[in-house]
Image (cartoon, rainbow, N blue to C red):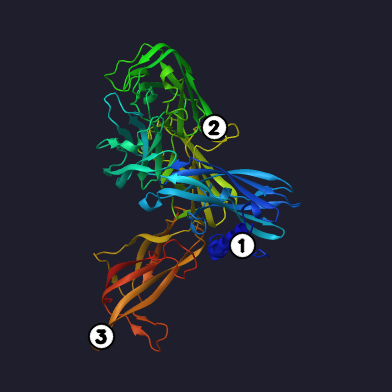
Amino acid sequence: MWDQTARSLGRLAILWTFLLNAIAPPVSARHDPVVTFGESAPIGLHVHLRDLHPRILAPGDLVTARVLLQNDRDEAVEVEALHLLVLSPDEETVLELLPPEAPAPSEIAPEVIGPRGQRLLTRSFRVAASRAPSVGRQRLAVLARVRSPRGISLLISPAREVTVARLRMHDLTVFPTVLPDCQGATAVGFELEIHNVTFNPVDDAQLLYELRERESQTLLASGRLRLGRLAAGERRRIRSMEPVEVPTPALIPGRRLVLDLLLQPEALAERRVLVIGTGADVKVEGVSIVPPDRAPGDSVLPGETAALGFTLVNRGNQQGTSPMLEVRLSARAGETPLRVEPDTIRLPNVALAPCGGSLRIGAAQEASEVPSTLPTLQLLIPPDVEEGEAIVQFDVERTSEEATTDTDEEPPRASFHIDLPNLRLLDVSVPQEVLLGQSASLWFRIANVRDHPQDRAPAPAGVRVRAALIQNGRQLAQVEFRTRRPIEAGRSESPPADFALRVPAQAEEGPALVRLEVDPPTDERPRGDVRESNEADNIVELPLRLKMPLPDLVVEAARFLAPGDPPTLVIGAPTALFFLIANRGEGTADPATHEISLVFTITIGPFPLQLHAPLRTVETSRLGRGRFAPFLVTLSVPPVVQLPGLPLPIPVPPGPAAIRITADSERSVEETDEDNNMIQIPVVLVSPP
């Protein structure tokens, strides 16, 4: 009890600042958090990490945690958040705090547990990125943030272990397993396949092996194989460079040895048992699972029927015989049983020669093999199975000569991968601002992403993609389309060119949200129309801003009804001027005043000085989008102008000048572009005759 209390206090001291910074309570919380640990918490709240799946996963994979929360209090509590803690091997240090692969932020809501109630929650977490330091065995615990009338509690479950590995070991064969062999040799060899299940090469892998006496654990032999570089997705067959010799003192009849293989730095281990003596030892080797129209070892898809084959091999030094040898087969994917047909095979009059005699059953392992005449084996994958590793188990009865030399301490197994598509929205782009009453064009790709090199599952055609515009929790608009063709793994499809959200003119100006979702759920199908390996990444939400449409007043088609280029204006004489005031913006322009002025230059000593003299103004009433108002006015350039701020009038000199027309000269109308309101018409001023 004291050890457990001391451990909890030590973890509390290490985690306190880290946890409060990572998941700090809202400002409105009136109580300080209380951190409690595991099942020893005396406050009536408990968290248990029921299950982690899968237990072996690749870097960057999702691990699914089933978390049981118990409330022994007489009051309801809210589970505000669940996080996954990566702990040090001694569970004293938090190495990383992982948030769940949660739904979109707009969907997040606390889980309520009633008085004396409990709730089983399932959350997915991305445990490790694709980098070497993250591989190996990891201790994981769940951190639950629970709010109650008494305050906020941070509960931590007891830890469980998973293995994060870039590589996998398959089809390990050890020969012989009964020593000495038929030639009297006392050495052991092994062979296996190593598979890189990531998109990154592995440069630092090595295979360690140790031969020990089983009872005393005395080390008899050891060695290592440096594997060199394994490319992304590479499968490599590895064979022991030289036989592992069993020392003479260990060759005692009846003694059992163990050969341990450890793949580093992945921390994956395999063990095989050897026996010293005389007898047969029938092994299951060369398991082949062949999906339709694909190669052995490829992923199997839900709803498919895969061909199954295996070889019975006698690795003993005596013939293995049986008048009726029975092999029972079973398979499962997680907790889901799979059908194997037939699930029982009876082999009459079996006689397997010593030291490698074999019988192939079912699908051929190699194209050159001729399978036996036994019934074809089929592995039926149900359509509702989840993605992950699945297991085929072989329960082989002993032959007459295996009474003391059978080394299978549990039924042999072989694993294979069940694959589902994973739809995701990539390269999503929405405009930062959209005007009320206008459309927001959306661009993105609907991708069927490959999380591993072995991923093959296609997504069917007709997958729904939905876009919604949300403001203040209210949906303003929604559009939807369906994909046009099946999307193979690693491929993508773009939306139609006209896919856009229409913003209602009655919407409010301010921030809003575009929510994009691929394969949205329905009442009949809560997981959508397509079963996927990960539904948590089907939603993307991006902010944008809704703005009132603004007008844009401009001057167009201005010209003088006067001769010359540029036009010649006689000072003091009337001249006709035509122009348009147009609204080229998206909104309606309120009534505005527009000024016509004279721009001319005078010289004071050696310095030219440009002056601006108003001549007259015109007005427009409300101008809608795309509307314009024509003006035909008569101008007369006065010989003398009185400029504001000057005590004396200024004479207008003949020569080059300009007539300036400024739309909304008083700046009373807010526009999209305030810099395009003015034009100048060059003119030549001449004195009156």
Name the front one of labels 1 and 2: 2
In which quadrant of the rendered view does residue 262 lie?
top left
Name the front one of labels 3 and 2: 2
Q: What element carries label 2?
A: loop
Taking the image as shown, residue 501 lies to the left or right of residue 364, namely: right
The residue under label 3 is which amino acid type? Answer: Phe
The residue under label 2 is which amino acid type? Answer: Glu
Mark 2 — residue? 335
Please report whichever mark, 3 or 1, sits nearer to the chain's N-terminal start: 1
How crowded is the residue under tag 1: few (<14 C-alpha within 10 Å), some, or many (20+)? few
Residue 290, above or below 122: above
Q: Is residue 449 visible?
A: no
So how many labels did they put on this image?
3
Please report whichever mark, 3 or 2, sits nearer to the chain's N-terminal start: 2
- Looking at the rendered image, the quarter that the C terminus falls into is bottom left
Mark 1 — residue? 26
Residue at position x 39%, y 43% in the image: 218
Q: Which mark is residue 607?
A: 3
How crowded is the residue under tag 2: few (<14 C-alpha within 10 Å), some, or many (20+)? few
Q: How many angstroms separate mark 1 from mark 2 (CA)?
A: 40 Å
269 or 624, which lies in front?
Answer: 269
Question: CB atoms at circles 1 and 2 under 8 Å apart?
Answer: no
Taking the image as shown, residue 473 lies to the left or right of residue 586, namely: right
Q: Residue 534 carries which label?
A: none
Residue 244, above or below 632: above
The residue under label 1 is which amino acid type? Answer: Pro
- Looking at the rendered image, the quarter that the N terminus falls into is bottom right
Q: How many angstroms separate mark 3 from mark 2 (CA)?
A: 94 Å
Name the front one of labels 3 and 1: 1
Q: What element carries label 1?
A: loop
Residue 522 in the image: state x and y as whole percent. Answer: 57, 35
